[in-house]
Amino acid sequence: MFLRIWSYDVAPGAVDRFAVAYGPDGDWARLFARSPGFLGTELYRDAGGGARFVTVDRWRDEADWTAFLAREAGAYRALDARFAALSGTQALLLEGTTPGG
């Protein structure tokens, strides 16, 4: 399995919109679901109820991710631009495979 894990510090007043867009049934997950290799998205919020979130996007393998990105690059960039104002900072924490695969 190939994972992409991101951390976000969400802008004040944007938490609800962020959770909808980045959640397991949100805009990002629907875009990723265009690929048969997409296995799902998980969204986690800081235990203190703050504005820090982590997303975990699961793919069958890295080849499925790169094929999706090549095919949907324009839609990916458009969605990224559309939601850019929701988070103050974002960082890719991990892009890799699960142990043994």
Image (tube, rainbow, N blue to C red):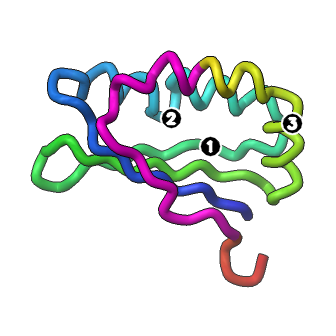
How many residues crowd around disc 2 within 10 Å: few (fewer than 14), some, or many (20 or more)? some
At x 48%, y 63%, the residue is 93
Residue under pointer 1: 40
Taking the view exactly as shown, the residue that stands out farthest to the bottom is: 100
Q: For residue 23, which quarter of the picture?
A: top left
Magenta residue check for 91: yes
- Residue 24: mark in rendering: 2
Q: Earlier in the sequence, mark 2 or mark 3?
A: 2
Give x and y (percent) for residue 54: 39, 51
Relative to residue 33, is residue 90 drawn left or right? left
User: Along the line of sight, which residue is nearer the eye, 51 or 77?
Assistant: 77
How many residues crowd around disc 3 within 10 Å: few (fewer than 14), some, or many (20 or more)? few
Are dots 2 and 1 in contact, CB under 8 Å?
Answer: yes
Alpha carbons under labels 1 and 3: distance apart: 19 Å
Range drawn in magenta = 79-96
Give x and y (percent) for residue 36: 84, 37
Q: For residue 73, which quarter of the picture?
A: top right
How many residues crowd around disc 1 within 10 Å: few (fewer than 14), some, or many (20 or more)? some
Residue under pointer 3: 70
Relative to residue 101, is residue 95 drawn left or right? left
At x 71%, y 20%, the residue is 75
99 to 82, vertically: above or below: below
Give x and y (percent) for residue 98: 67, 74
Alpha carbons under labels 2 and 3: distance apart: 22 Å
Q: Amino acid at mark 2?
A: Pro
Q: Earlier in the sequence, mark 1 or mark 3?
A: 1
Give x and y (percent) for residue 90: 40, 46
Q: Amino acid at mark 3?
A: Ala
24 to 37, vertically: above or below: above
